[in-house]
Amino acid sequence: MKQLFSLLPSFIAILLFSSSCVVQESPITGTKRAYAYSWDQEIELGRQVDREIVAEYGLYDDEVIDEYIQELSTAVLENSHMRREDTAEQFRETEFTFRVLDSPVINAFALPGGYVYITRGLMAHMNNEAQLAVVIGHEIGHVAARHASQRGLQQTLGQLAVVGGAILGQEFLGISGESILNLSSQAAQLIFLSYSRSHERESDRLGVEYAAKTGYAAEEGAAFFTSLKRISDRSGQALPNLLSTHPDPGEREQTIPRLADEWRERGHEQTVRNTDKYMQMIDGIIYGDNPRDGFREDGYYYHPDLEFLFPVPENWHLINQPAQVVLVSPDSDAVMILRIDQESNSAQESVRSFLANNNIEQADEQTAQSSGTIPAYEANFSIQDGEQTLGVNVFALEYGERVYRFINYSAEQQFDDFKPTFDGTTRSFNVLRNDRILNIQPVRLQITQTDRRVRFRDLMPNQLPMNIDPEEIAIVNQVHLDDMIEAGSWVKIPVQ
């Protein structure tokens, strides 16, 4: 099990290679330069972290969309530096992996060695195939330029940035990037470590080049970045341009059409948009958080598929992921983490194996219960973490033929103050019996064509599901609420 106590990112398990300098060829320029890793090491690093990414976030379960992404991405890859005749054989023969993650976050990123990811949230915000081709080309560009290995030379061991390239930064998650880095798995830590702005701009140029050479109308990518700017403005959390490692979305919506024009002037005709095909492809795609995977409502966390609930302390932030649920106190000075323990057969075994695996020799152990009937076992202890001492409560319970384990901690001097809050959640874990919640379904995008000229605002239903507001859906459609929509135009409307 990974170490959960460190409040600083720990990459020991994935730093398999020395970060000593190696001199190798660039697939982009063909010239030699210094990198942190050899190409073989980049491939191995990507392969290992890919397993964590898939386990942490899950793949979107739609074979049709998966096959579509493979086909589109392979076409763009064939027009990249990674498949050119004058590129070194080791690069040309590198197998790429393209995945769609089951995440509502609007994002795309790449691992070194040929692993590229997009989210269903990003796909929902695209209006045609050309926009997606530019983003996929951008991520292939990160891999081809070996930005991760370049970045590795500029980092200390504890800050090593081996993955980046997120189309958005961490500000769209609703919680600070620092908290995400401290609390998520190693794979999640890696995703939100970013490249420099110069690397991002280079990947923008490469993304436009690869899309244009595949025949796509690469200038379409600008409309997507306009949407990102609107999302950023709505969130109120946009980073100042000079402090952001990503180019400002407003800058990108200006530069992408210019870059596309440059390739058009070089003789690359760019006509492919495939709007109809794309819209039909995403018809029915899940939009936003999928409540079947767990959600928060009226002070409780509910998981319909696993049929349990527990109270969430007031004003605590909740991070819901496929592999874990994380609760963070308002001042980020206490944490609760719930995971399924797949290795243990009982609550007592779960707690004691945790203690043994983390070399905890002195702990206050006792049997317990959740909601009066669910068997449980807990241990309380202190552990040294760098210069501070943490107070820790490990609470495991047996429910539904599974063992669930909470790991709750704070600074030792605050532990007694937080312990009643920890107990209020763990000891109230209970069976979910509410039929409405047990049967709840995700919101999906219904894709239709208008039969008349109409204002977009007038296409909205009287009530949108899951607290979605009309402006959000206007952004998804890359229009404004008062824009006139021509007859025959495609529109995306959320339904539940």
Image: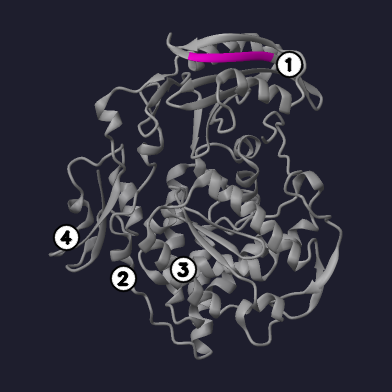
What's the CA distance linking mark 3 and mark 1? 49 Å
Judged by depth in the image, the label closer to the viewer, 2 or 1, is 1
Q: Label 3 neighbourhood size at 10 Å, few (<14), some (14-19), many (20+)?
A: some
Q: Earlier in the sequence, mark 4 or mark 1?
A: 1
Q: Position of residue 233 (x, y in %)?
A: 45, 48
Residue receiving disc 1: 382
Q: Which residues are magenta?
A: 375-380
Query: Does 240 sit above or below residue 133?
Result: above
Per the model, the C-alpha gap separating discs 2 and 4 is 23 Å
- Are the residues at dot 4 and dot 1 in contact (C-beta closer than 8 Å)? no
Q: Nearer the viewer, residue 187 or 8?
A: 187
Answer with left or right where residue 199 lies relative to residue 270: right
The dot on residue 454 is 4
- Work out how far the residue at label 4 is from the one at label 1, CA to CA, in angstroms: 64 Å
Q: Give yes or no for contact between labels 2 and 1 (Cβ–Cβ under 8 Å).
A: no
Quadrant where the image shows the C terminus = top left
Badge 2 or badge 1: first in the primary sequence: 2
What's the amino acid at mark 2? Answer: Lys
- Between marks 4 and 3, how big is the CA–CA gap? 36 Å
Residue sitting nearer the eye, 234 or 292? 292
Count neighbours of disc 4 (C-alpha within 10 A) and say few if under 14, some if 14 to 19, many if 20 or more. Answer: some
Sequence-first tag of 3 and 2: 3
**Direction front: furthest residue:** 345
- What amino acid type should be assigned to the residue bearing mark 4? Val
- Rendered location of residue 481, percent (x, y): 27, 53
